[in-house]
């Protein structure tokens, strides 16, 4: 997984599975663009991703989470629930605004 934190007026957290970085998924009117320049940051394992998500959830942050491993980490961090997960071409994702 790759974790990248963008700093603007609030933190924008991008977490994505390594194997889908740089890919585009489309289904009907929905599009999931896993751009390398947005998502590719630090390579992290599940434990580090979970810890980072828990800590960043305490901030005024937005989360963009894409991929099975990344979404699973967000579930384990209790950042999202199963109801908050969408799919495009079978790729799970969740967008969270705290």
Image: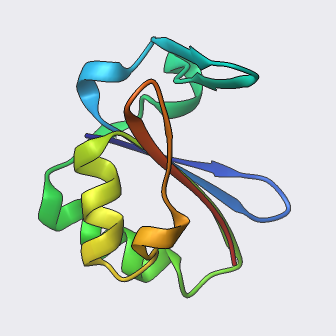
In the displayed structure image, the side of residue 42 where residue 63 appears, left or right:
right
Where 23 sits versus 38, above or below? above
Q: Quadrant of the C terminus?
A: bottom right
Residue 38 location, quadrant: top right
How many numbered marks appear?
0
Where 44 sits versus 95, above or below? above
Determine the residue located farthest toward the front in the rendered image: 28
Determine the residue located farthest toward the top in the rendered image: 23
Tell which of 70 and 2 is nearer to you.
70
The chosen color scheme is rainbow
Q: Residue 14: horizontal and vertical position, in percent? A: 52, 46
Q: Residue 56: horizontal and vertical position, in percent? A: 50, 75
In the displayed structure image, the side of residue 68 where residue 10 appears, left or right:
right
The residue at 25%/40% (across/down) is 1
Tell which of 35 and 37 is nearer to you.
35
Determine the residue located farthest toward the right in the rendered image: 9
The residue at 25%/60% (across/down) is 72
The residue at 76%/22% (across/down) is 29
Q: Residue 82: horizontal and vertical position, in percent? A: 40, 70
Residue 35 location, quadrant: top right
Residue 20 location, quadrant: top left
Q: Residue 65: horizontal and vertical position, in percent? A: 47, 49
Where 45 sits versus 98, above or below? above
The residue at 50%/71% (across/down) is 83
In the displayed structure image, the side of residue 11 where residue 25 appears, left or right:
left
Where 66 sits versus 23, above or below? below
């Amino acid at each position: 997984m790759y974790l990248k934190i963008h700093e603007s007026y609030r933190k924008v957290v991008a977490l994505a599975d390594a194997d889908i970085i740089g890919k585009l998924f489309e289904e009907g009117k929905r599009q999931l663009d896993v751009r390398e320049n947005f998502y590719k940051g630090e390579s992290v394992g599940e434990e580090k991703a979970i810890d980072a998500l828990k800590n960043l959830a305490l901030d005024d942050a937005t989360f963009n989470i894409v991929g099975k491993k990344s979404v699973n980490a967000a579930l384990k961090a209790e950042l999202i629930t199963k109801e908050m997960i969408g799919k495009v071409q079978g790729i799970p994702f969740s967008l969270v605004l705290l």
